[in-house]
Image (cartoon, rainbow, N blue to C red):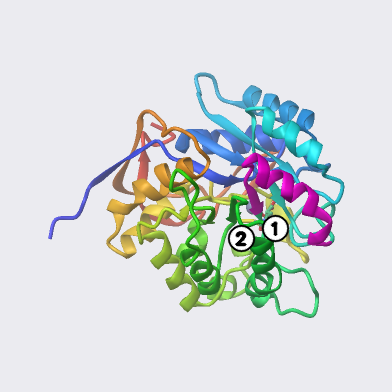
Amino acid sequence: MTDIQTLTLTRPDDMHLHLRDGAALRDALPWTARQFARAIVMPNLRPPVVRLQQALDYRQRILHALPAGSDFTPLMTLYLTDETTPDMVAEAARSDMIHAFKLYPAGATTNSDSGVTELKRAYPALEAMQREGMPLLIHGEVTDADVDIFDREAVFIDRHLIALRRAFPELRVVLEHITTAHAAEFVRTAPEVDARGVPLLAATITAHHLLHNRNALFQGGIRPHYYCLPVLKRESHRLALLDAATSGDPRFFLGTDSAPHARDAKEAACGCAGCFTAVDALELYCAAFEERGALHRLDDFASRFGAEFYGLSRNAGTVTLARRSWTVPLQLPYAEAEIVPLHGGELLSWQVQPAPDA
Ligand code: NCD
Ligand code: ZN
């Protein structure tokens, strides 16, 4: 058997990314801009990106933080709150810069205190989004303290998502960073498509949820860099996600959910949720797809299905990965401190070319 030695992809898009702001933005952004042509940028800053003007200002800060010569394009999103009005949705839809609204159930994850407290309150805004063709991106976890943390995604689907889709059957929805067989099955069996044949319900899948199950959190001791939300699940769920990602179904596409936090905020008594994968994102997806002998399916997952869902043209140009073992940096500079990339200090067998130090 001859192993594939290089893999050339259409320049991919990261359809779920946290870039932060200020010095953190300056240090995180170049890693994504190296690997991806565009990214859907999450609005969970402090304060959150709620209004069109805030998103336009944030977009300018991202463009200013880009390395010279980079043509990376940030695709901006707005943070849905109890106060989002139909007029705010219509205004966002008229601007070419806003690609989605993000729904965080209040308290579900990092910087989600301003999130929606009860879904019904967002119904007028959701109705406007449905009318405008504006996608809704969902952090699909209930926040009830009495629901087991490993069940929160499945319970969100049963308690909220089913009703939401019935109420707004034409709304474009992305269930973000899915982690369970339940979510994969819910998305896979949603038959609805728009007039262009584009699915109305889709899901992003992270590299870390394709590669790891919840044992990774506790291997030899507690491993804070593997802690993210939704939290890693058991192996049967990981296998269901791998099935979905490598199936060639356009409902599933790449979103890293790379979520940088400084080392001391992760390695703490109450560490932050979020895995930083921008440094080695494509390499990790390669490892996952290779586990299934499905490297030939990575191009559609990384570079085509997401663009089609968002009504964007495919990127020009390519990125090439070579089979070459390299050690992921143990830590990197981050906002006057340091950050630990997921798999920092470990050997990976694929590498984006040219290597950063080349
Ligand atoms: C994200 C973050 O740090 O902003 N954390 C995470 O664990 N994924 C927020 C999120 O997407 O839930
Ligand atoms: Zn996220």
**Where does ligand 1 appear, by image quarter?**
bottom right
In the image, is residue 131 part of the stretch drawn in magenta?
yes
Is 8 placed left or right of 110 in the picture? left
Quarter holding the N terminus is bottom left
Q: Main secondary structure of the magenta part?
A: helix
* Residue positioned 52% across, 33% down in the render: 33
Q: Which residue is mark 1?
A: 266
In the image, is residue 136 part of the stretch drawn in magenta?
yes
Q: Is residue 88 above or below residue 271?
A: above
Residues rendered magenta in the picture: 118-137
Give, as a three-letter code, the residue at label 2.
His
10 Å crowding of disc 1: few (<14), some (14-19), many (20+): many
Q: Residue furthest left?
A: 1
Q: Residue furthest top?
A: 69
* Residue 98, picture quadrant: top right
Q: Which mark is residue 225?
A: 2
Give, as a three-letter code, the residue at label 1.
Lys
Number of marks in picture: 2
